């Protein structure tokens, strides 16, 4: 059954029912894909030791994996004109293979090549995948995005454990057989989606500038929110273990803190999208954007075990905004859903990258505890920006 858009005859075709099986398959494969893309950080100390890398060289590896995200809008334009299913189907295998070969790379140049290939695969997956999720979620886009994004958040939680366990069992140069799980995920996606229509043949080529202009009322406030929220996200996702280690002197507590933060984020991501389907996107975003900085204030103001419930609240609220924002982007994307998602992801990438550097610079000068308070203040400033989002009844 096809839904008809009253004002746009070339709007993307979308089923009205929530296809639970297809949503779950995409979500599980998102988990598998992102487990591999998270291998670099836990393996980096071993790669540094093996190849005698400097910290600058080590940091450049991550940069090479991130560079393809700058091309997300153009990847989205391509995905709007061809079937997005093949971008998504082959991505888990295309990411698993280079990330599983890191241990056998003979030199630094090969490591850079492997990271670049991975970056392209990651971009080709994450730009069109939310479009497919929207396609198979019917009118419950928020719920579909919650399932999908929870797979990614859970992957970030367990990826270091998987990498360390695989290397501990097989050795750095022998753990490459783990790529088989990514190849199996691609095979599962092929069997599941080879006959699912995900491309509207009526869709015409839309110039990127037109997509940017039409998405301006949504992307402009979202971009400002992403920047202000990015300070809190960068401060916690990157520097939380360092902060806890400085405060307690216990490295094991630093690891537990990051697990608590990411684990709470999985629950938040899973809940937020579905709640936004019922109560509205702006209301759920308002609760998240207000709850996260308040919880961050309380986390830094307390000591001992009492601060960890606040860390749970931070993870739940701070990380839960992503599926709601993705749902907003898809609902206002019109005839260019993948290009619109590419624009959003490029803005998100630039905001994350820039704010992490600024957070580190501030932390060097006033300490991480005071930096967290500054980030919380900036986070609260994002709340009024919600009023600039378009009326939720106009999609």
Image: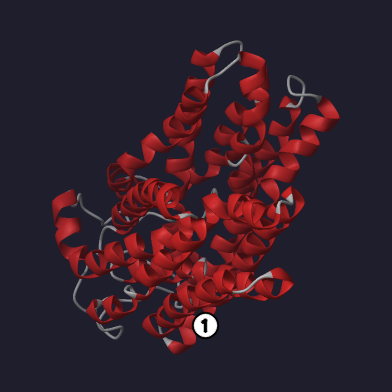
- Answer yes or no: is residue 95 visible: yes
Q: Provide residue 58's location: percent of width, then percent of height.
A: 52, 26
Given residues 47 and 372, the one toward you in this image is 372
Q: Nearer the viewer, residue 312 or 185?
A: 312
Q: Is residue 96 above or below residue 49?
A: below
Look at the numbered disc 1 and give the secondary structure of its residue: helix
Circle 1 crowding by C-alpha within 10 Å: few under 14, some 14–19, many from 20: some
Which residue position is annotated with label 1?
275
Q: Can residue 117 be spotted in the picture?
A: no
Quadrant into which the C terminus falls:
bottom left
Left or right: 35 in relation to 288: right
Q: Residue furthest top?
A: 106
Could you tell me how many numbered marks the image carries? 1
Q: Position of residue 111 (x, y in %)?
A: 54, 20
| Residue displayed at 31% across by 83% down | 392
Which residue corresponds to the image point at 62% horizontal and 65% vertical from the top-left?
Answer: 266
Residue drawn where x is 82% and y is 26% of the image: 170
Which residue occupies the extreme right position in the image?
169
């Amino acid at each position: 059954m096809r839904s008809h858009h009253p004002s746009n005859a070339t709007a993307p075709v979308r089923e009205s029912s929530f296809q639970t099986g297809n949503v779950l398959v995409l979500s599980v494969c998102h988990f598998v894909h992102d487990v591999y893309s998270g291998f670099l950080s836990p393996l980096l100390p071993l790669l540094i030791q093996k190849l005698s890398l400097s910290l600058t060289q080590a940091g450049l590896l991550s940069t090479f994996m991130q560079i393809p995200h700058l091309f997300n809008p153009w990847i989205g334009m391509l995905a709007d004109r061809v079937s997005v299913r093949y971008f998504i189907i082959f991505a888990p295998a295309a990411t698993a293979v280079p990330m599983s070969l890191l241990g056998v790379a003979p030199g630094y140049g090969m490591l850079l090549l492997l990271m670049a290939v991975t970056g392209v695969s990651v971009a080709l997956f994450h730009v069109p995948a939310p479009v497919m999720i929207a396609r198979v979620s019917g009118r419950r886009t928020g719920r579909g995005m919650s399932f999908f994004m929870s797979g990614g958040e859970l992957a970030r939680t367990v990826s270091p454990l998987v990498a360390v366990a695989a290397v501990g069992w097989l050795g750095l140069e022998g753990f490459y057989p783990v790529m088989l799980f990514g190849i199996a995920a691609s095979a599962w996606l092929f069997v599941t989606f080879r006959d699912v229509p995900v491309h509207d043949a009526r869709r015409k080529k839309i110039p990127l500038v037109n997509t940017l202009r039409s998405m301006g009322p949504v992307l402009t406030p979202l971009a400002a929110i992403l920047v202000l929220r990015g300070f809190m996200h960068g401060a916690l996702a990157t520097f939380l273990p360092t902060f806890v280690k400085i405060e307690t002197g216990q490295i094991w507590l630093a690891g537990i803190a990051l697990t608590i933060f990411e684990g709470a984020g999985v629950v938040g991501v899973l809940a937020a999208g579905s709640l936004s389907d019922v109560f509205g996107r702006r209301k759920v975003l308002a609760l998240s954007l207000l709850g996260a900085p308040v919880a961050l204030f309380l986390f830094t103001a307390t000591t001992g075990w009492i601060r960890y419930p606040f860390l749970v609240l931070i993870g739940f609220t701070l990380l839960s905004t992503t599926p709601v924002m993705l749902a907003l982007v898809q609902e206002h994307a019109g005839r260019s859903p993948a290009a619109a998602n590419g624009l959003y992801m490029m803005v998100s990438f630039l905001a994350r990258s820039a704010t992490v550097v600024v957070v580190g610079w501030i932390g060097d000068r006033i300490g991480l505890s005071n930096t967290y308070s500054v980030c919380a203040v900036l986070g609260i400033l994002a709340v009024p920006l919600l009023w600039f989002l378009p009326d939720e009844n106009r999609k």
